[in-house]
Amino acid sequence: DAMVIQNPRYQVTQFGKPVTLSCSQTLNHNVMYWYQQKSSQAPKLLFHYYDKDFNNEADTPDNFQSRRPNTSFCFLDIRSPGLGDAAMYLCATSRDLGDREKLFFGSGTQLSVL
Amino acid sequence: AQSVAQPEDQVNVAEGNPLTVKCTYSVSGNPYLFWYVQYPNRGLQFLLKYITGDNLVKGSYGFEAEFNKSQTSFHLKKPSALVSDSALYFCAVRDDTGRRALTFGSGTRLQVQP
């Protein structure tokens, strides 16, 4: 049973056209994360929510925004996608913040920018 | 600062043979180390973690990892590989100095041949 669900599995957008990726979780976890994974590279953390508290990584471009309307859902908004934003976007959750917490990942959304 | 190195892009091993996937890390303070596996078209799945205690950590699917502080390594091992172990493996590290985010390695593709 899927616990972290990402939709859609594949997303195609046009250069400069805003796009939203969605993530939902059935685990009731406090923390939700968005990672960007480019081909043959490590997943890179963009930001995370601890409950409603938003935490942006220092090097995340302003073009990337996020919303978490409730515990179960989190959205990634790319305001003006560029060709360099084509990547796999991974949503993850953890029960809490803390060094010992393991992450639960969704299957990812593969974003193409034309 | 923290970083992870996975020196091998790909590891090939015959079914039934032992396998090792290498990982070295760099952190300030004590490391918390993780291994995740990514099967095709799936999200990352937690395999095992080292927080403290015994240097040999056992995880899911018969995998284990050995923490070596002097060599700053956390190699993933399995005594007898299965074809179904073929996947992408990521090593990840956190430090204990207050940084919340995991840093992932670039991944190692394990190919187990029948």
Image (cartoon, rainbow, N blue to C red):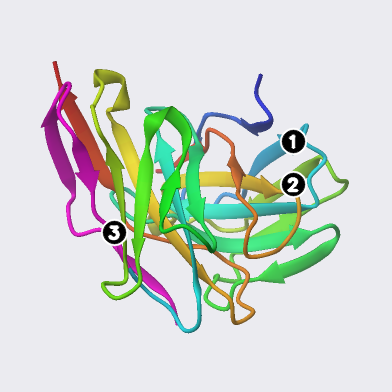
Marks 2 and 1 sit apart, C-alpha to C-alpha, by 9 Å
Q: Is residue A98 positioned above or below B86 on the image?
A: below
Q: Residue A1: x and y, percent? A: 66, 19
Q: Residues within 10 Å of mark 3 (few under 14, many from 20)?
A: many
Query: Are marks 3 and 2 in one subunit?
Result: no
Q: Residue at x 31, y 32 (%)?
A: B87
Q: Nearer the viewer, mark 3 or mark 2?
A: 3
Q: Is residue B77 above or below residue B25?
A: above
* Residue at 60% in and 71% down: A62
| Residue bounds of the magenta highlight | B1-24
- Chain letter for mark 2: A
The local crowd at label 1, few if under 14, some if 14 to 19, many if 20 or more residues have their Cα within 10 Å, is: many
Name the residue: 54% across, 45% down.
A90
Marks 2 and 1 in Cβ contact (< 8 Å)? yes
Q: What amino acid is found at the position of numbered circle 1 in the picture? A: Gln
Residue position marked by numbered label 1 in the rendering: A25
What residue is shown with label 2?
Answer: A74
Q: Nearer the viewer, residue B19 or A4?
A: B19
Q: Is residue B12 magenta?
A: yes
Residue drawn 48% across and 45% down? B48
Chain for numbered disc 1: A
Q: What SS does tag 1 mark?
A: strand
The residue to which callout 3 is attached is B23
Query: What crowding class fits label 2: few (fewer than 14 Cα within 10 Å), some (14-19), or many (20 or more)?
Result: many
In the rendering, at what x and y percent does residue B20 appear?
22, 44
